[in-house]
Amino acid sequence: MIKPIAIKTKKTLSIALLLALTASCRNISDTWLKEYQKTKCEWDKKEKEFKLDSIERTAGVNAELISVKNEIARLTIPIQYQIKELDSQISKTNIKYLKKNREISDRQEAAYGHISTPEFEMKLKENDDNNIGEVQILENKKKILQSKLNDNKTYQKLIFRQNQIKDKTLKITQKIQENYNIIFDGLKQKLDNQNSDYRMILLDLNNIEKQNFKNQRDQINKNPCK
């Protein structure tokens, strides 16, 4: 009579131990998820703070940069328009002489087939030379326009000022980045440790528990501060 009682007690203890271990695994998973969400949310908030801080601290110089760019555009747009017109003329000129080239070749083929003649070669060379000559005139006009802009003292001062503002903006942004890097480095270390713990926890879970655990983590990644 004593043995059956002992066996029953042993079975009861085994089930209780199993339940305790299961609850323990669940508690570990829940704790990890809470801590992971806390870290991810803090990262998300700091990223938003960094962007807002950057915008606020560079607002003044950015406004000045826009003003300078507008002044530069006032000088460059008319010249860019003229250069664009010259580019269009160059394209039309090349097409015009290409058509002439084909006409010369068609007449040659109609008269002599695929046989070349000195007169044919001379006409082709003359057509190509005329093409190059006309295009070169237009290219020179473009260079003169660009040179006129580059030599403009007001334009030079504006470009110099624009570069100064860009350098200033870069320095401000770099300083802000340095300050936040300390925070992000700490959070990254924390996340690295938590991801290492995540992989260890998975080893103690069955397939269903693993999938649920992964889904919960993925949900946190999508919306960490929910």
Image (cartoon, rainbow, N blue to C red):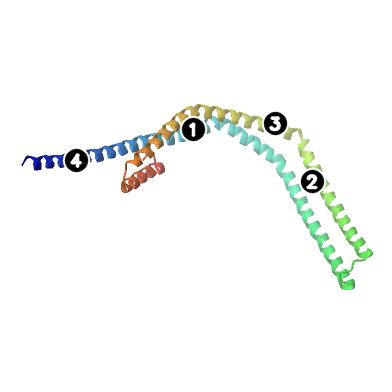
Q: Amino acid at mark 3?
A: Phe
* Relative horizontal placement of residue 104, taking residue 190 as reference (left or right): right
In front of the other: 69 or 22 = 22
Q: Residues within 10 Å of mark 4 (few under 14, many from 20)?
A: few
Q: Are marks 3 and 1 in contact (CB under 8 Å)?
A: no
- Please name the residue that numbered disc 3 is placed on: 160
Q: Please tell me whether mark 4 sits on a helix, a strand or a loop.
A: helix
Cα distance, mark 2 to mark 1? 45 Å
Q: Which mark is residue 171?
A: none
**Quarter of the view holding residue 100:** bottom right
Q: Amino acid at mark 2?
A: Lys
Q: Amino acid at mark 4?
A: Ser
| Residue in view at x 33 percent, y 48 percent | 207
- Please name the residue that numbered disc 4 is placed on: 14
Q: Amino acid at mark 1?
A: Phe
**Quarter of the view holding residue 123:** bottom right
| Residue in view at x 16 percent, y 42 percent | 11
- Please name the residue that numbered disc 2 is placed on: 142
Q: Please tell me whether mark 3 sits on a helix, a strand or a loop.
A: helix
- Whole-percent x and y of residue 149? 76, 39
Cα distance, mark 3 to mark 4? 81 Å
Q: Which mark is residue 50?
A: 1
| Residue in view at x 82 percent, y 50 percent | 138
Q: Are marks 1 and 4 in contact (CB under 8 Å)?
A: no
Cα distance, mark 4 to mark 2? 91 Å
Cα distance, mark 3 to mark 1? 29 Å
Q: Residues within 10 Å of mark 2 (few under 14, many from 20)?
A: many
- Whole-percent x and y of residue 145? 79, 43
In front of the other: 121 or 59 = 121
